[in-house]
Amino acid sequence: MTVVEPDVHAVEQVTLRDLEWTDLAHLAELEQHLFASDAWSEQTWWAELAGRPRRDYVVATATDGAIAGYAGLDVAGDVADVMTVAVAPTHQGNGVGRVLLAELVRRATERRAEAVLLEVRADNHAARRLYERAGFEVISVRRRYYQPGDVDALVMRLLLTKGDA
């Protein structure tokens, strides 16, 4: 377990830890609030954790022990893919997303990835700002990727150097 002090722009201290099986019901409930029809069920989370051992999922807990957010990373060879960065509505805007994203980049670097990739809805301006501030750049657009609604996805990349940690 790692206690992370937020950067100067954040106001909330969180504790990071690996996702545990006992978190899955809460994550499924939180997904409903965040992603509605695109939310993963508890059964989907169980299958994800059982079937994808190379993926890292990290949870940020608030000082009261509640899950403030979670994030996932899949590293295959020299490329790491951000699976998700999700922040509970009551903790959004408090720097939790920045802390989670920094942890994913740290883990990607530790696993010797050369780049981190992610996809974000083109209309999700808050998430796009988070990624751009972390150094990600748009490298392509996937037209009408997110359904329903035919919303475009931006593919973003962060190149890692040997000195990153």
Image: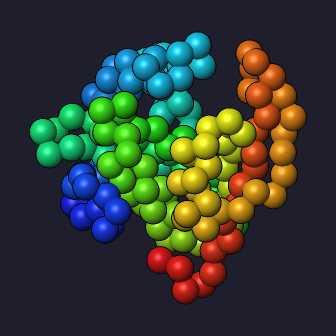
State the residue at coordinates (69%, 44%): 119
Q: How is the image coloured?
A: rainbow
Q: Residue 10 or 160: which is nearer the viewer?
A: 10
157 with respect to 56 (left or right): right
Where is residue 70, by image quadrant? top left
Q: Quadrant of the N terminus?
A: bottom left
Identify which residue, 10 or 69, lies in the foreground: 10
162 above or below 8?
Answer: below
Quick one: 8 or 111, which is closer to the camera? 8
For the question of whether residue 74 can be seen, the reply is no
* Residue at the image position 54 percent from the left and 44 percent from the top: 126
Q: In which quarter of the image is residue 63?
A: top left
Counting from the top left corner in percent of width and height, residue 132 is at 61, 60
Residue furthest to the left = 64
Residue 58 x/y as whole percent: 39, 47
Residue 165 visible to an observer of this rendering: yes
Q: Is 109 situated left or right of 19 in this image?
A: right
For image coordinates 43% across by 49% down, the residue present is 97
Residue name at image x 22 percent, y 60 percent: 3
Picture quadrant of residue 122: top right
State whether residue 164 is above or below residue 56: below
Vertical relation: 53 (above or below) 80: above
**Percent x, y of residue 36:** 53, 16
Query: Number of marks in the image?
Result: 0
The percent coordinates of residue 16 (x first, y second) are 29, 53
- Compared across the picture, whether 4 is left or right of 81 comes to left
